[in-house]
Image: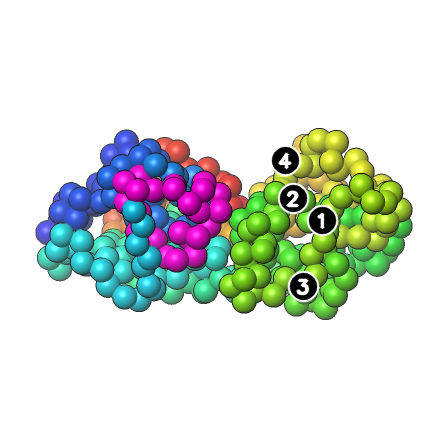
Amino acid sequence: MRASDLLKPRPEGLYCPPGDFFIDPVRPVGRALITHGHSDHARSGHRSVLATQETLDIMGLRYGEDFAGTTQAAVPGETVDMNGVAVTFHPAGHVLGSAQICVEHRGMRIVASGDYKRQKDATCLPFEPIRCDVFITEATFGLPVFRHPPDHEEIARVLKSAAQFPERSHLIGAYALGKAQRVMRLLRDAGYDKPIYIHGALARLSEYYQSQGIDLGRLEPATVESGGKADFAGAIVVGPPSAFADRWARRFPDPISCFASGWMRIRQRAKQGGVELPLIISDHADWDELIITIKETGAAEIWVTHGREEALVRWCELEGIAARPLHLVGYEDEGD
């Protein structure tokens, strides 16, 4: 069987004709398999959804309990038969509940990895390399310039700055799902035991992470209704990046602006965003991790999607690996 007969790009997303399902479709479809809960991959309105229980729960929190007609929880490592196509979910290491989706039929095995990273992360299961014929990889940071430093070193920079400037607050911009909770856990693992103040947009997802046994420590709402700016002197505050552009951020004493993202490797991008303390912490694989992962899968063919597709395709060609860009549309960098 040819790989293109098992999975093929369509305007709705990756489609499996023999199984009659889509992977991470960008518009409502009859049957959707979802890799993780970020809104560019997990959308509401599908007739049926198959995803890990955590992803289903996250979609319910974000879209309401009626986000799909029917839902089914996929257990990592257990195979589900879909019209004769074997489908298995494996951990992707991206955010809580994230998964790669292995599709196998008539001797052809394709792994759609969704978004993934290889750095250790206490808030989700680690990525599992799966041997396959075709590996579908993201390329968000698919350029050699992107090499992410150890995340604990980046968090140490925040704590060092907080010790140096006890009269100032530190505002860390981090995406609401995955990145924010990872930053909180990294702070705890580094020994920070004071309350972490959070924007209201992070509350429900952070509570859900806590309910799943991921200890984020004491979290307090970042509000000043009951006090003043002085109450946040020396505080670490975590919120979505969008919140730092409005009046909410001005309630804190002489705040030091931080942003946790793989894009902070680009100094000009940090400068343009007014980021005083850029933190290179990404939930995506960097260049070296992309290369290592491709090699570990043993795939004879690589399909590259959403990101710097051309550079990774070119590297594959130089290594003698067949590769092509999928040019899928509708996927952003929400979880970077």
Q: Which element type, helix, strand or loop, lies under badge 4?
A: helix
Residue under pointer 2: 200
The x, y position of residue 214, in whole percent, is: 56, 64
Q: Which element type, helix, strand or loop, lies under badge 3?
A: loop
Would you say the residues marked 1 and 4 are in contact, meaning their CB atoms lie under 8 Å apart?
A: no
Q: CA distance from mark 2 to mark 4?
A: 12 Å
Q: Which badge, 4 or 3, comes first in the chain's sequence?
A: 3
- Here the colouring is rainbow
Residue kind at label 2, given as amino acid type: Gly
Residue under pointer 1: 221
* Magenta stretch bounds: 46-69
273 sits to left or right of 204: right
Residue under pointer 4: 242
Residue under pointer 3: 217
Residue 331 falls in image quadrant: top left
Would you say the residues marked 4 and 3 are in contact, meaning their CB atoms lie under 8 Å apart?
A: no
- Label 1 packing within 10 angstroms: few (<14), some (14-19), many (20+): some
